[in-house]
C-alpha cells in the first residue's frame, strides 16, 4: 500500500526561498517525470553552463531532500528543527562536481507522537511550526501526525449532543496535558480549557495543514476512538459505555463500544465537522486503550472493537485508512497475547490498517507478531521519553537494525519514522534516521554532521564527533532517564522512578571530545548548541560523583568533607545553569515565556498558562509521574533542582551531622513535596538572566575550573 503523494516544484522552491532568501537565485528546481523516478528520487547537479545548482526530484519532498543533501554536503549548512537556530549561509555556493542523488528505500516517512504535542510543541505558534514543517520536508518526512486544533471539532460535536460549553471545556484538560486527554488517559486535569486556546489552535491547525499539503505531505488527522465524556453516559444511558482501567493515578475515563450505534453516529459527526474545518487526506490516527486495559480481553470482543472502528471510518469516508501506534502492544505485551492481538488486527481488512512499530530500537513488535499478521507497518525509532535531556542514540546500531528490518520484513514494511516524545538534545540521531532512508551511511553522516555544525571541514572536529559516535552515543533512551542533578535527593540511588541517572560510557571520554571541539572555537550557533549540550551532560554525570562523596562523608560523620562536597555541588550546578541559559533551547524561562504568550493581554490567562508550563516539567500532575519530563535546563536547574531540592538536602544533612543527629529523611521528603507543588503553581520563572552569558566564554570558564579541581568533592 502506498498513500498518495502530490506536489510540484513550486513547494520546494518556496521552501528554499523561505530559508535562503535572495540566495535562492543560485538554485534551479526541476521535476523528474514519474516514468523515470520509480519511487521517491532526488538528484543534485551543476547546470550545463556552470551558473546554477540543479535540484531535481519526483515531487516536492524529494526535491527538499535534494536541497538538504546539497546544503549539508557542499555548503556545510545545517537547518535545525528549531527556528531559534539561525541559518548561517556560505559566502560562496560551491557547485557539485557531478550529478549525484538518492532514492528512498520506503515510500512513507512518518514523524511525531501524541506526547510531542505536550513535551515540545504545546506552546508553539506559527513561526516555530513554519520552520519545523520545512525541516520535516528537508528530511523527507511525508506523513506527519497532525493533532492540533481537534478540540474545536469536538466542541461542535459535544454541543450537538446537548452538552454545555462549560461542561465541554471542563472535560478537556489544560493545554499541557491535552495529549493524554486525546489518548483517553485522563479528563479535565488542568482545565477548564480556555475558549481562546480552542479558537487559536483551530486557526493554527489551518496554517499547519495548508503548508504541509503544499509540500506534498499526507497529514494524519485524528478520528473517534471511543473516548467520551461521562456526561454522554448520563445523556445516553442505554449506550454501551464502560470505564477503562485507571491510568497513573487519574480517574478512569469512559469508552463507548464501537459496536454501539452511537459510536457510528459520533464518528460521522466528528469526521464531517473535521473535514469541513480542515479537509482530509483519508488517513486517520485512531488509538484505543493506550496503556490501559480494554473492558474485555476476550479475542472476539477485541476483534469486534477493531472491526467496528474501521467500519465507522469507512461509512464516513470510503477512502479511509487507519493508522495506529503499536506502543500499547509493547507496553502491555503480557496481556496482548498472540491470540488477542491476531484477533484485533485481522478483523480489519488487509492493508486498511497501518501499524506504527513504535519502539524498534528496543523491541521490534513486528518480529514477534508474524509481521503484525500481514498488516502494513512503519518501522519507528522512538529515541526520547518526556523530553529528557540525555545523550542517547547509537547511529551504528540504528543503521544495522533498520537495514535488517528492510531486508527481512517480507514486504509489508512500508515506511520508516520516529515517534519521539520530545525534541531532545540529540538531533543528529533523528536526522540520520531519515538520511539513512536515502542511502547515507552512519560513518559518512558523522562527517557531514561535524562539518555543518562547525561550518567547514575540520579534522579535529570530525575526530571529536567520531569519538562521540563510537564511545558516548551508545545507549538507547528509556522512560525516566535523567542525571542525578535532576533527581530527588537521596543518599543512594535516585529519589523517584522517573529519574534514572544511567549512562554506560566513560565520562572522561565525553570530556575528551569536548576538549577537541573547543580547540578552535567558531561563532556558529549549532556548534555552540553542541558545546552546551555535551558539557552540561558531563557536569550532570559528574554530579553523581559529588553526591556519592557527600554520602560517604555523611556515613563517616566527616562534616568538613560534607561541606567540601556541598560547595562543589553548588558551584557545579550554578555554573551549569549559566551555561544552559546561554541557549534558548535549554532555557526554562523561554519555555514559560512561550506559554504565557498564549494569554495575550489577559494576565489571568498568562498566569494560567505559566502554571501549566511549570507543572508538566516538574510534578507532571500526580505522584506517579513526578519528574517524568525532567530537563537539564537553565533556570529550572538552579531554581528548582538546586534551590528546592539539593540545597535543602545538603544543608539539612550537614546540620544534622554537626548536631550529632541522624538526618530525618521522612520529614525532608514531606517538606520537599510541598516545595515541589508550590513551584508547580508558579506563574513565572523567578530566575532568568536579563543578559544571557556568552556560551563559549562560560564553557572556557568551566573547563578551567575542571582543570583546577573546583568541582572535585
Image (tube, helix red, strand yellow):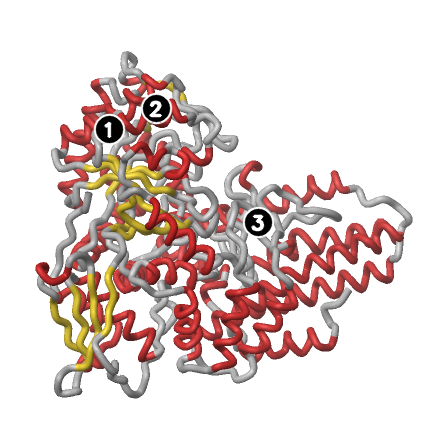
Horizontally, residue 183 falls left or right of residue 48, namely right
Q: Quadrant of residue 98?
A: bottom left
Q: Quadrant of the N terminus?
A: top left
Q: Residues within 10 Å of mark 3 (few under 14, many from 20)?
A: many
User: In the rendering, at what x and y percent does residue 589 appear?
Assistant: 49, 61
> Is residue 279 positioned above or below 515 on the image?
above
**Disc nearest the viewer among 2 and 1:** 1
The residue at the point 39 percent across, 73 percent down is 448
Q: CA distance from mark 2 to mark 3?
A: 35 Å
Residue underneath mark 1: 348
Residue underneath mark 3: 679
User: In the rendering, at what x and y percent does residue 425 appear?
Assistant: 48, 61
Query: Which structural element holds mark 2?
Result: strand
User: In the rendering, at what x and y percent does residue 557 appear?
Assistant: 89, 53
Between 493 and 72, the one lying in front of the other is: 72
Residue at the far right in the pictured view:
660
Query: Which structural element holds mark 3?
Result: helix
Q: CA distance from mark 3 to mark 1?
A: 48 Å
Q: Which mark is residue 556?
A: none
Q: Is residue 160 visible?
A: no
Horizontally, residue 230 falls left or right of residue 538, namely left
Q: Is residue 693 visible?
A: yes
The residue at the point 27 percent across, 36 percent down is 375
Residue underneath mark 2: 255
Between 517 and 87, the one lying in front of the other is: 517
Amino acid at each position: 500500500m502506498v498513500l498518495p503523494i502530490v506536489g510540484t516544484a513550486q513547494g520546494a522552491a518556496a521552501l528554499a526561498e523561505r530559508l535562503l532568501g535572495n540566495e535562492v537565485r543560485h538554485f534551479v528546481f526541476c521535476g523528474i517525470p514519474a516514468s523515470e523516478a520509480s519511487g521517491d528520487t532526488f538528484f543534485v547537479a551543476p547546470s550545463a553552463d556552470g551558473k546554477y545548482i540543479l535540484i531535481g526530484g519526483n515531487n516536492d519532498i524529494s526535491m527538499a531532500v535534494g536541497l538538504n543533501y546539497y546544503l549539508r554536503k557542499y555548503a556545510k549548512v545545517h537547518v535545525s528543527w528549531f527556528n531559534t537556530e539561525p541559518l548561517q549561509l556560505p559566502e560562496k555556493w560551491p557547485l557539485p562536481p557531478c550529478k549525484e542523488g538518492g532514492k528512498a528505500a520506503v515510500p512513507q516517512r512518518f514523524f511525531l507522537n501524541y506526547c510531542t504535542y505536550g513535551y515540545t510543541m504545546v506552546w508553539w505558534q506559527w513561526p516555530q511550526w513554519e520552520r519545523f514543517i520545512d525541516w520535516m520536508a528537508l528530511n523527507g518526512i511525508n506523513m506527519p501526525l497532525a493533532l492540533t486544533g481537534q478540540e474545536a471539532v469536538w466542541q461542535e460535536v459535544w454541543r450537538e449532543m446537548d452538552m454545555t460549553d462549560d461542561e465541554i471545556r471542563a472535560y478537556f484538560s489544560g493545554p499541557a496535558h491535552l495529549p493524554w486527554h486525546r489518548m483517553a488517559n485522563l479528563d479535565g486535569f488542568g482545565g477548564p480549557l480556555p475558549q481562546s486556546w480552542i479558537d487559536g489552535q483551530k486557526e493554527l491547525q489551518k496554517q499547519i495543514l495548508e503548508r504541509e499539503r503544499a509540500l506534498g505531505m499526507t497529514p494524519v488527522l485524528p478520528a473517534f476512538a471511543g473516548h467520551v465524556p461521562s456526561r454522554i453516559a448520563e445523556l445516553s444511558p442505554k449506550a454501551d459505555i464502560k470505564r477503562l482501567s485507571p491510568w497513573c493515578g487519574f480517574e478512569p475515563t469512559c469508552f463507548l463500544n464501537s459496536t454501539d450505534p452511537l459510536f457510528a453516529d459520533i464518528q460521522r459527526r466528528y469526521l464531517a465537522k473535521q473535514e469541513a474545518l480542515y479537509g482530509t487526506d483519508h488517513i486517520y490516527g485512531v488509538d484505543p486503550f493506550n496503556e490501559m486495559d480494554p473492558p474485555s480481553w476476550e479475542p472476539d470482543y477485541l476483534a469486534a472493537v477493531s472491526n467496528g472502528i474501521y467500519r465507522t471510518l469507512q461509512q464516513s469516508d470510503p477512502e479511509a485508512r487507519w493508522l495506529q501506534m503499536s506502543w500499547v502492544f509493547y507496553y502491555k505485551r503480557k496481556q496482548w497475547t498472540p491470540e488477542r492481538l491476531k484477533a484485533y488486527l485481522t478483523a480489519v481488512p488487509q492493508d486498511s490498517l497501518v501499524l506504527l512499530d513504535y519502539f524498534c530500537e528496543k523491541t521490534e513488535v513486528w518480529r514477534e507478531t508474524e509481521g503484525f499478521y500481514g498488516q502494513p507497518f512503519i518501522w519507528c525509532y522512538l529515541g526520547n521519553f518526556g523530553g529528557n535531556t540525555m545523550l542517547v542514540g547509537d547511529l551504528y546500531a540504528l543503521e544495522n537494525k533498520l537495514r535488517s528490518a528492510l531486508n527481512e520484513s517480507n514486504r509489508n514494511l512500508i515506511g520508516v519514522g520516529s515517534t519521539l516524545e520530545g525534541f531532545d538534545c540529540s538531533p543528529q540521531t533523528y536526522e540520520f534516521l531519515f538520511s539513512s532512508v536515502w542511502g547515507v551511511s552512519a560513518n559518512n553522516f558523522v562527517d557531514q554532521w561535524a562539518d555543518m555544525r562547525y561550518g567547514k571541514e575540520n579534522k579535529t572536529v570530525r575526530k571529536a564527533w567520531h569519538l562521540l559516535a563510537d564511545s558516548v552515543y551508545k545507549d538507547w533512551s528509556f522512560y525516566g532517564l535523567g542525571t542525578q542533578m535532576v533527581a530527588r535527593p537521596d543518599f543512594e540511588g535516585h529519589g523517584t522512578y522517573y529519574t534514572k541517572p544511567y549512562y554506560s560510557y566513560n565520562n572522561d571520554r565525553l570530556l575528551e571530545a569536548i576538549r577537541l571541539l573547543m580547540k578552535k572555537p567558531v561563532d556558529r550557533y549549532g556548534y555552540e548548541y553542541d558545546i552546551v549540550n555535551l558539557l552540561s551532560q558531563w557536569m550532570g554525570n559528574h554530579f553523581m560523583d559529588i553526591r556519592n562523596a557527600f554520602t560517604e562523608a555523611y556515613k563517616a560523620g566527616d562534616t568538613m568533607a560534607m561541606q567540601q562536597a556541598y560547595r562543589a555541588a553548588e558551584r557545579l550546578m550554578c555554573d551549569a545553569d549559566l551555561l544552559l541559559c546561554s541557549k534558548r533551547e535549554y532555557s526554562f524561562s523561554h519555555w514559560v515565556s512561550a506559554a504565557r504568550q498564549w494569554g495575550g493581554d489577559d494576565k489571568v490567562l498568562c498566569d494560567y498558562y505559566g502554571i501549566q508550563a511549570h507543572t508538566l516539567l516538574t510534578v507532571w500532575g500526580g505522584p506517579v509521574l513526578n519528574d517524568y519530563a525532567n530537563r537539564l535546563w537553565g533556570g529550572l536547574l538552579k531554581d528548582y533542582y538546586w534551590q528546592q531540592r539539593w540545597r535543602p538536602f545538603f544543608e539539612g544533612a550537614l546540620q544534622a551531622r554537626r548536631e550529632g543527629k541522624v538526618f530525618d529523611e521522612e520529614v525532608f521528603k514531606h517538606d520537599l513535596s510541598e516545595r515541589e507543588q508550590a513551584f508547580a503553581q508558579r506563574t513565572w520563572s523567578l530566575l532568568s538572566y536579563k543578559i544571557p552569558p556568552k556560551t563559549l566564554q562560560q564553557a572556557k570558564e568551566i573547563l578551567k575550573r575542571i582543570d583546577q579541581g573546583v568541582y572535585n568533592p
